[in-house]
Every structure is written in C-alpha cells, then in structure tokens.
Image (cartoon, grey):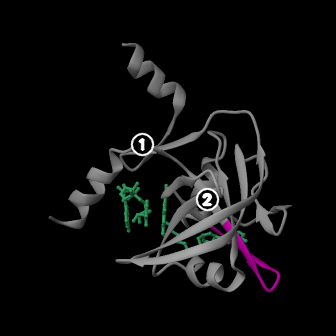
Amino acid sequence: MDDRQFRNAMGKFATGVNVIATEVDGEVHGMTANAFMSVSLDPKLIVISIGDKANMLERIRQSGKFSVNVLSCEQQEESMRFAGQKQFEDKFEFDQLGETPVVKNALCQLSCEVYNEHVEGDHVLFIGKVNELVLEEGDPLIFNCGKYRRLEALEEVLSK
Ligand code: FAD
Ligand code: NAD
C-alpha cells in the first residue's frame, strides 16, 4: 500500500480543522491539525497527533501546554496560514485563554496542559487535560478528501 492510497483513504473521513497553538519564551507558534478527538469526561481529556518533523513538537514538549482552536468556515485563511499553504505579510495576533495563546473567533478554544505523551510511528500523540474553554456560535470549516469544505455544501448533497 503506498502513502497516497492511505492518505486518500483517511481523507474520506470528514473532519473539522483546528489550529494548535503554544508559547515558548514569549514566542507563539501555531500549526493546523485535523487529528483530534475527545478522550475522557472525567477527567476532561482530548488527544492531538503531531508529526515528528513538525516544529510544533518540541515547542509543546517545552511549554507543557497547548490550545486547540476549532476553526469556523470563515477561517480557511487561518488554516492555510498555520499549515504553511499560503504566506502572509501581516503579524497574526493571538488572544490569551488561561496559560495558552488562542485564535480569535474560533468556534471553540480549549486551553490544555499536557497530561500524557505517546510516540506512535512517525507521530506523537499528546493527551491534553482541558483547563478552560470558550465557545462561539457559527459553522465549522470542514476538511474532506484533501479539500476545505463548508457544511452547507454537505447539506445540499444529503437533501438530493
Ligand atoms: P511550521 O511549518 O513551522 O509553521 C506552520 C506555518 O504557520 C508557517 O507558515 C509559519 O509561518 C506559520 N506560523 C507559525 N506560528 C506563527 C505565528 N505566531 N504567527 C504567524 N504565523 C505563524 N500535521 C500534523 O502533524 N498533525 C495533524 O493533525 C495535521 N493536520 C492537518 C490538517 C490540515 C487540514 C492541513 C492542511 C495540514 C495538517 N497537518 C497536520 C500538517 C501541518 O499543518 C503542516 O505540516 C505544518 O506546516 C507543520 O507545522 P510546523 O509546526 O512544522 O509548523
Ligand atoms: P491529504 O490527502 O494528504 O490528507 C488526507 C488525510 O490523510 C488527512 O486528513 C489525514 O487523516 C491523513 N494524512 C495526511 N498526511 C498524513 C501524515 N503525514 N500522517 C498521517 N496522516 C496523514 O490532504 P492534503 O491536502 O494533501 O494535506 C495537506 C498537507 O497536510 C499534506 O502535507 C499532509 O501530509 C498534511 N496533513 C498531515 C496530517 C497529519 O500529519 N496527521 C493530517 C492532515 C494533513
């Protein structure tokens, strides 16, 4: 099985899109990530998966904290910025929630501390304990089959 076939298979599973953010020595680093899952209610745990080549990896290890920011359908540019898919000249201004930087206007901001870490293949799974959260109204940005999509488009397909 080649990598492309595996990625095409994984891409069939539609997800939301998050920006993970952390701060080390006063410098904020952001990274787009769709590998995310709710893990436990008691305690409140989530998991993210970070590639072993990502600059984000050592930053999370150093800070011991990160935020998960669920993007709205108005925030494709934020996803592209933090995936390195598009370059921007302007400085990106983060908000702060608890001890982590967060993305303004995200549908959900989760401020987490690292609860556990598991190295699995070429990714590292970070279990995050959610300390604070903020919710906003709006529709999510969707990632499916390697493309950004909006929820309205999915509803049209379903109603046919
Ligand atoms: P870098 O490549 O160092 O940074 C990413 C980009 O963010 C750069 O362009 C950088 O300039 C910019 N940036 C970072 N901090 C700031 C700041 N403070 N202000 C302004 N710009 C900043 N990879 C995974 O490991 N796990 C996933 O779950 C995952 N899901 C993805 C989902 C989608 C939809 C996409 C498009 C990509 C996904 N990726 C995922 C890939 C990942 O986003 C990229 O490989 C990313 O470039 C790797 O991050 P890095 O930490 O090496 O960041
Ligand atoms: P794609 O077709 O590569 O992505 C489809 C699906 O494949 C993703 O949703 C993810 O589940 C999986 N996937 C892709 N790359 C992976 C990787 N390196 N490790 C584990 N799973 C992976 O979509 P695309 O538009 O070509 O993606 C844009 C870029 O973002 C690519 O460079 C891709 O590798 C990267 N990406 C990485 C991850 C990840 O590391 N977990 C997830 C999504 C996208």
Let me know if residue 25 is in the magenta part.
Answer: yes
Residue shown at 57% from the left, 74% from the top = 116
- Quadrant housing residue 51: bottom left
Residue 123 drawn at (x, y percent): 42, 74
Question: Tag count in the figure?
Answer: 2
Which residue is denoted by mark 1 in the rendering? 14
Determine whether the beta carbon of the residue marked 2 sits less than 8 angstroms from the nearest atom of ligand 1. no
Mark positioned earlier in the residue sequence (1 or 2) = 1
Which residue is denoted by mark 2 in the rendering? 45
Residue shown at 55% from the left, 64% from the top = 83
Q: Which residues are magenta?
A: 21-30
Determine whether the beta carbon of the residue marked 1 sits less than 8 angstroms from the nearest atom of ligand 2. no
Q: Nearer the viewer, residue 130 or 122?
A: 130
Residue 87 visible in the current orientation: no
Residue 140, compared with residue 104, is above or below; it is: above
Q: Quadrant of the C terminus?
A: top left
